[in-house]
Image (cartoon, rainbow, N blue to C red):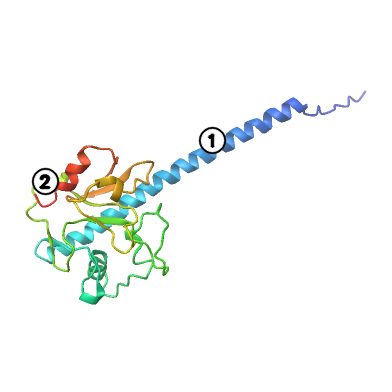
Amino acid sequence: MKVVRTRRAFTLVELLVIVAIIALLSSLLLASTSRLKVQRDKVLCMQNMREIFHWLEFYAQENGGSLPAPLTNLSTGQTSWWTLVGLFKNPKYTTTDPTQNAMYQCPVAKRTFPAGSPMRTYGLNTEGQSNTLSMPIVRNTMPSTTLLVIDIKRNSGSDSYPYFRYTQTPYFTEWVDARHDGLFNALFLDGHVELLSPTDPQAKIYITNFGK
């Protein structure tokens, strides 16, 4: 005699359990993906800063050990630090080419100039605001604790002047953009990059070490 086997259907409870398991696994996957993206953006930002240092270092070697001053003022012939570095890297550098300005922009910061040009989201530590090479680095005796470039907020009135002055107060509430989970990337004068907190009491010292 042939035995006919029947397949038992899932009960409603079993279906609900399966749906709950799938939802849980999906949420865990999304959370993991989000964390990976945050970590990736931090790393890409650090890589940008290391590339900036690479070209700043070359620039300084060709200019008596000094870094470029930060200000742009076409009416007086003054040129921004990123333009000077960009031209040093590529004689055909243009400030409006997104591919040539990628290293100046943190992947988290998506802002652009009103005219649509790529945003520069890193600031240079400087006291000078002229077209002279006013930032000598050869005499600095504490490069590993001297801030050079940081994640920076929109400067007051214009996005085209990304720099921060080491005598300016308040130091972080005005200048620093802590866009990486409440931390900001910082490039030091010796070329290393690390994440810092805006509340780090050492940060003020790191800024004012410039020129010492």
Task: Locate residue 121, reporting x and y percent.
Answer: 33, 57
- Residue 87, by quadrant, is bottom left
Residue 204 or residue 20, whichever sits in front:
204
Direction from residue 54 to residue 47 in the image, left or right? right
Q: Secondary structure at mark 1?
A: helix
Q: Residue at x 88, y 27 (%)?
A: 4
Question: Disc 2 versus disc 1: distance between alpha carbons?
Answer: 45 Å
Residue assigned mark 1: 28
Choose mark 2 or mark 1, whichever is in front: 2
Q: Residues within 10 Å of mark 2 (few under 14, many from 20)?
A: some
Q: Residue at x 15, y 47 (%)?
A: 208
Disc 1 residue type? Leu
Disc 2 residue type? Met
Q: Could you say which disc has been placed on residue 94 in the image?
A: none
Q: Residues within 10 Å of mark 1 (few under 14, many from 20)?
A: few
Labels 2 and 1: the sequence-earlier one: 1
Q: How many marks?
A: 2
Task: Locate residue 26, reporting x and y percent.
Answer: 58, 38
Q: Could you say which disc has been placed on residue 142 in the image?
A: 2
